[in-house]
């Protein structure tokens, strides 16, 4: 099972502190220095981990939280990911995925296995989401990665292997998006653990590629950990030279008015969404659906597709 955690609501409010810290931005001259190097890992079972993580997100743009998933749940996830990969191959075709340079990427996993809904119920995840982008946030994406061992893979050969931002917009320090990535396998430099470039979040101008290559740090953390980062942080998948696959699941959560990568309500169907807990429905976009007719527009307030108070 997922490790239980205390009340996520009372930990921190609305992410205003994170946004305020980002308003000053980072100059190109102090591209890395503000981060202080490799981020310290925080144990989710210890008191007070959330404020420390939020402070690290402000300063370095990323943080590591260990001890979030149990070994049993990790193993269940591993089995579900390989099973889902085979289903995606049958539905989409390997050739189309190869043409899209999506080696080992699993999109819309919720459609193929209900286990992945449980990641949207983890209190530690919800605590971070509430603090960074608010309680009306929605799931922009949930993507699985089965990163194969390809020692000679050149940087940029696949999208994930090139430096990029998952939210490629600078909004004057406003925090609109946060990522929560789970290490199903331990992240190591040898198996291609995510490379982050500390303190490159909330930059109006992209940093030089030479600086990112020089200052990038391979995240190392045990299986069951979560890597949290401001979605404007520059990062890339590392090169997997371990001789075996590396598995991970990335989530991106945004303010409710930002369009999702996949319309999960339409992709999953009303029945599948309505079967979920209310907070999961919210995250999937159930309360921010776009109307398609006047009949839908003039529904009673309790039945509206786009509910009031969604940010």
Image (tube, rainbow, N blue to C red):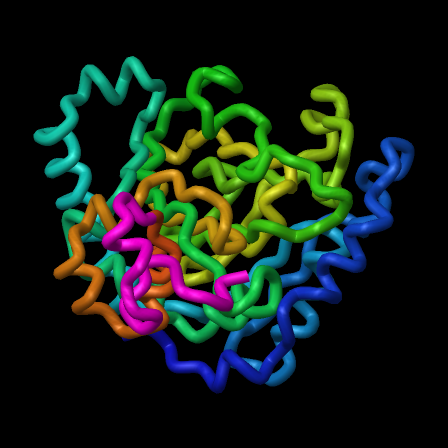
Residue 89 appears left or right of 25 = left
Residue drawn at (26%, 54%) of the image: 296
Q: Residue at x 47, y 69 (%)?
A: 126
The x and y percentages for residue 20 are 79, 59
> Is 233 in the magenta?
no
Which one is in front, 259 or 12?
A: 259
Left of 249 or right of it: where is 160? Answer: right
x and y percentages locating residue 116 in the rendered image? 26, 57
Residue stretch rendered in magenta on the structure: 291-311
Q: Nearer the viewer, residue 229 or 161?
A: 229
Question: Does residue 8 appear in the picture of this structure?
Answer: yes
Q: Is residue 52 above or below residue 173?
A: below
Q: Is residue 202 left or right of residue 65?
A: right
Q: Give the left or right position of residue 232, taking residue 1 as reference.
A: right
Residue 221, horizontal then vertical, whole percent: 51, 55
Asked if 230 appears above or below 206 in the picture, the reply is below
Which of the two residues, 74 or 286, is positioned nearer the viewer here? 286
Which corner quadrant holds the N terminus?
bottom left
Q: Residue at x 56, y 73 (%)?
A: 43
Main secondary structure along the magenta-highlighted residues = loop
**Which image quarter: residue 39?**
bottom right
Residue at the spot 69% in from the left edge and 70% down from the top edge = 52
Q: Quadrant of the C terminus?
A: bottom right
Residue with the most extreme left position: 90
């Amino acid at each position: 099972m997922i490790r239980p955690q205390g009340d996520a609501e009372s930990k921190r409010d609305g992410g205003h502190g994170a946004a305020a810290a980002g308003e000053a931005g980072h100059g190109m001259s102090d591209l890395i220095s503000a981060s202080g190097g490799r981020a310290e890992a925080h144990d989710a079972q210890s008191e007070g981990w959330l404020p420390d993580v939020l402070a690290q997100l402000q300063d370095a743009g990323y943080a590591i939280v260990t001890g979030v998933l149990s070994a049993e749940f990790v193993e269940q996830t591993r089995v579900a990911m390989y099973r889902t990969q085979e289903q995606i191959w049958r539905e989409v075709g390997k050739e189309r995925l190869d043409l899209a340079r999506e080696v080992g990427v699993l999109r819309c996993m919720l459609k193929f296995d209900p286990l992945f809904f449980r990641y949207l119920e983890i209190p530690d995840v919800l605590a971070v989401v509430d603090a960074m982008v608010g309680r009306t946030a929605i799931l922009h994406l949930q993507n699985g990665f089965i990163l194969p061992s390809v020692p000679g893979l050149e940087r940029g050969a696949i999208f994930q292997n090139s430096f990029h931002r998952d939210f490629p917009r600078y909004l004057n320090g406003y925090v609109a998006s946060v990522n929560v990535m789970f290490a199903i396998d331990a992240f190591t430099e040898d198996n291609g653990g995510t490379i982050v470039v500390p303190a490159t979040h909330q930059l109006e101008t992209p940093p030089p590629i030479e600086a990112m290559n020089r200052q990038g740090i391979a995240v190392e953390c045990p299986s069951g950990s979560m890597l949290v980062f401001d979605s404007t942080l520059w990062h890339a998948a590392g090169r997997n030279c371990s001789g075996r696959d590396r598995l991970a699941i990335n989530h991106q959560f945004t303010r409710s008015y930002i369009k999702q990568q996949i319309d999960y309500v339409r992709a999953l169907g009303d029945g599948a969404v309505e079967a979920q807990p209310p907070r999961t429905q919210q995250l999937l976009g159930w309360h921010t659906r776009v109307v398609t007719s006047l009949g839908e527009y003039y529904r009673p307030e309790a039945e509206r597709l786009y509910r009031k108070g969604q940010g």
